[in-house]
């Protein structure tokens, strides 16, 4: 299965589920990631987003939906699929879409965003999702040739405040600009109401991760509310 830009239309107004666990957690196992992904499909997910090469491989084998893959390397600065080498490895692992840092910050390998996107397109069949942190990032990512743009890094790059829920203002700003690329809402979408608000703000599709697939966080939310 090769996903084309035209094929992205199937994701319009749909839910993408991000299945990730942090290092050291009991669920940090690619087999578990794939099982969680398969469970999300039963619930109606239209695509899956996962982190790590093995997670991409296991998830590809477990679901018959588009897989958005990424490789986190580090914790600060540009660490979401930070170089072309990382991106091609994710594509070669089987990701239909490679999610990369889509900000205007300097990349560890010295390549520009446009050079990175062009390299992915030239050496793989994968599409590119640019994880952006601001409106200017989104504009630059579209100009660089990204196939999708996401609000994944809004509130994490210093350009915008970290909102309690999804950055609806940013979504509305990007959506109203007519950039002609699918706009994916991602980041701090913790309730079904948040997901609906993101669509109403102009998102093409919505990614939900922690609120669906991270039991430690969900448990903490309940306990915190009970003892506030």
Image (cartoon, grey):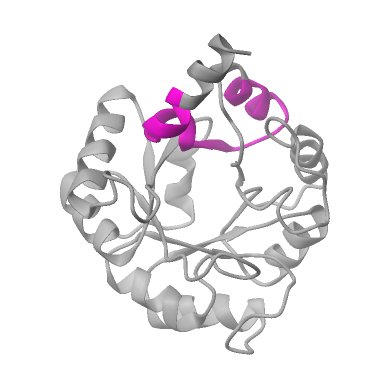
**x and y percent of residue 166 in the render?**
68, 34
- Above or below residue 33? Residue 198 is above
**x and y percent of residue 77 in the render?**
66, 69
Residue 71 visible, this orientation: yes
Q: Residue furthest top?
A: 226
Residue 118 picture quarter:
bottom right
Residue 48 picture quarter:
top left
- Above or below residue 122? Residue 158 is above
Residue 100 located left or right of residue 88: right
Q: Residue furthest front?
A: 227
Q: Residue furthest bottom?
A: 110
**x and y percent of residue 136 in the render?**
82, 60
Residue 1 visible, this orientation: no
Q: Nearer the viewer, residue 9 or 217?
A: 217
- Above or below residue 34? Residue 102 is below
Instruction: Tell whether position 205 is magenta.
Output: yes
- Residues shaded magenta: 194-219
Q: Residue at x 70, y 66 (%)?
A: 103
Q: Residue at x 72, y 69 (%)?
A: 143
Q: Main secondary structure of the magenta part?
A: helix
Residue 147 located left or right of residue 23: right
Q: Residue at x 63, y 28 (%)?
A: 199
Instruction: Tell whether position 116 is magenta.
Output: no
Q: Nearer the viewer, residue 138 or 21?
A: 21
Q: Residue at x 71, y 80 (%)?
A: 106
**x and y percent of residue 152 in the render?**
62, 49
């Amino acid at each position: 299965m090769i996903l084309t830009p035209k094929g992205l239309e199937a994701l319009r107004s749909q839910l993408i589920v991000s299945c990730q666990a942090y290092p050291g957690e009991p669920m940090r196992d690619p087999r578990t990631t794939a099982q969680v992904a398969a469970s999300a499909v039963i619930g109606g997910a239209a695509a899956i987003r996962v982190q790590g090469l093995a997670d991409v491989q296991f998830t590809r084998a477990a679901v018959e939906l588009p897989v958005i893959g990424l490789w986190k390397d580090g914790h600060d600065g540009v660490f979401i699929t930070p170089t072309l080498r990382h991106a091609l490895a994710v594509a070669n692992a089987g990701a239909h879409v490679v999610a990369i840092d889509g900000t205007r910050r300097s990349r560890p390998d010295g390549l520009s965003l446009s050079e990175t996107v062009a390299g992915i397109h030239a050496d793989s069949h994968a599409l590119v999702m640019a994880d952006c942190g601001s409106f200017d990032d989104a504009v630059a990512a579209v100009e660089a040739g990204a196939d999708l743009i996401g609000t994944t890094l809004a509130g994490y790059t210093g350009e915008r405040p970290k909102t309690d829920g999804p950055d609806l203002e940013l979504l509305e700003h990007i959506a109203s600009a007519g950039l002609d690329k699918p706009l994916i809402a991602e980041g701090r979408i913790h309730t079904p109401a948040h997901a609906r608000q993101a669509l109403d703000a102009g998102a093409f599709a919505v990614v939900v991760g922690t609120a669906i697939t991270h039991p430690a966080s969900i448990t903490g939310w309940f306990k915190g509310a009970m003892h506030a």
